[in-house]
Image (cartoon, helix red, strand yellow):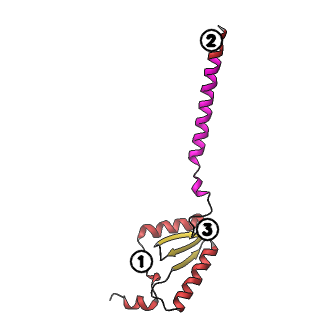
């Protein structure tokens, strides 16, 4: 009888532990750790500034330092009369979520990214 009580106690302990483990697993599944990382890549951190990367050909919502770096790199490329520009700093938003909404809309719309080309090259490629 005493052995049966011990077995029932151990069994109920395992059942309780498995329920607790399931609750912890459910909470961990709901948490996306990639959204907690401040860096999107080695090139960009998360932020509310929309930039188009003309080299890697993608939109990104990034931080102010990358936005400013893009402005500087673009100015240098234009000063050196390069036909292809490295990026385009588009706009700063009030929040990262607002920037992400615009980024998704631009990505899904297939927006023409002619701003990656110098103004002279764009003039040459005009379709009449």
Q: Are marks 1 and 2 in contact (CB under 8 Å)?
A: no
Q: Residue at position x 60%, y 43% from top?
A: 27
Give the CA distance from mark 2 to mark 3.
61 Å
Disc count in the image? 3
Q: Mark 2 or mark 3: which comes first in sequence?
A: 2
Q: Residue at position x 49%, y 92% from top?
A: 81
User: Which range of residues does the magenta coloring cover?
Assistant: 8-37
Q: Secondary structure at mark 2?
A: helix
Residue under label 3: 47
Give the CA distance from mark 1 to mark 2.
75 Å
Please rate how many residues cluster around mark 1, counting C-alpha atoms within 10 Å: few if below 14, some from 14 to 19, many from 20: few
The image shows residue 117, relative to residue 8, as above or below, that is below
Q: Residue at position x 62%, y 30% from top?
A: 17
Location of the C terminus by quadrant is bottom left
- Residue 92 pos. (x, y %): 60, 74
Please rate how many residues cluster around mark 2, counting C-alpha atoms within 10 Å: few if below 14, some from 14 to 19, many from 20: few
Residue under label 2: 4
For residue 112, the mark is 1
The secondary structure that dominates the magenta segment is helix
Q: Residue at position x 54%, y 84% from top?
A: 74
Please rate how many residues cluster around mark 3, counting C-alpha atoms within 10 Å: few if below 14, some from 14 to 19, many from 20: many
Q: Mark 3 or mark 1: which comes first in sequence?
A: 3
Q: Residue furthest top?
A: 1
- Residue 6 pos. (x, y %): 65, 15
């Amino acid at each position: 009888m005493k052995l049966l009580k011990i077995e029932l106690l151990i069994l109920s302990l395992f059942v309780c532990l498995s329920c607790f483990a399931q609750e912890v697993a459910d909470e961990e599944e709901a948490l996306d750790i990639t959204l907690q990382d401040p860096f999107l890549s080695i090139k960009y951190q998360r932020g509310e500034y929309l930039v188009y990367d003309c080299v890697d050909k993608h939109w990104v919502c990034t931080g102010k330092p990358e936005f400013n770096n893009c402005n500087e790199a673009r100015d240098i490329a234009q000063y050196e009369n390069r036909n292809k520009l490295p990026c385009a700093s588009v706009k700063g938003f009030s929040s990262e979520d607002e920037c992400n909404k615009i980024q998704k809309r631009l990505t899904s719309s297939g927006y023409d990214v002619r701003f990656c080309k110098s103004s002279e090259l764009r003039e040459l490629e005009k379709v009449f």
